[in-house]
């Protein structure tokens, strides 16, 4: 919309409700579960947190499973669990791939 006499420049502003986002920019909550009843700590590391083993600690549940919900963007993401510091693949993952260091990692697809 161009400024006119009817709509002077100082009354024009962006409508926060009309903002458009591409699907790639939006996030969706993704639940991660890890079965490790004897573990003292479980963390999640992936391409979505620069593989930082300390930034996403998981929460132990009473049934022995560990849980964490992470908002992820559309697409495929690589990750792995660190159970007491040891890398572990997710048997419930969408698939398995190799990261840039040729290590096996789990895959999750977000749509």
Image: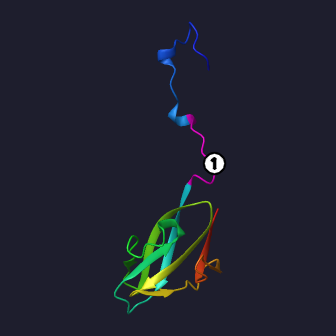
* Residue picked out by circle 1: 22
The N terminus is located in which quarter? top right
Q: Residue at x 62, y 54 (%)?
A: 24
- Quarter assignment of residue 60: bottom left
Which region of the structure is painted magenta? Answer: 18-26
Looking at the picture, how far across and down is residue 37, in whole percent?
40, 90
Above or below — where is 51 with respect to 7? below
- Pick whichever, 83 or 30, lies toward us: 83
Task: State how the image is colored.
Answer: rainbow
Looking at the picture, how far across and down is residue 106, in whole percent?
59, 79
Crowding at mark 1 (Cα within 10 Å: few <14, some 14-19, many 20+): few
The C terminus is located in which quarter? bottom right
> Is the magenta region chiefly helix, strand or loop?
loop
Q: Residue at x 52, y 12 (%)?
A: 8
Give the residue at the far left of this rendering.
40
Give the residue at the far front of this rendering.
101
Above or below — where is 9 with respect to 98? above
Secondary structure of the residue carrying tag 1 is: loop
How many marks overall?
A: 1
Give the residue at the far top of this rendering.
5
- Quarter assignment of residue 19: top right
């Amino acid at each position: 919309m161009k400024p006119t006499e009817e709509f002077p420049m100082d009354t024009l502003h962006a409508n926060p409700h009309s903002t458009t986002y591409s699907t790639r920019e939006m996030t969706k909550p993704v639940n991660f579960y890890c079965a490790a009843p004897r573990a003292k700590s479980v963390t999640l590391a992936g391409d979505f947190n620069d593989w930082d083993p300390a930034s996403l600690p998981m929460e132990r549940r009473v049934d022995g499973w560990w849980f964490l919900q992470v908002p992820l963007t559309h697409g495929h993401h690589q990750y792995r669990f660190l159970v007491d510091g040891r890398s572990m693949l997710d048997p419930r993952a969408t698939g398995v791939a190799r990261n840039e260091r040729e290590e096996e990692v789990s895959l999750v697809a977000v749509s």
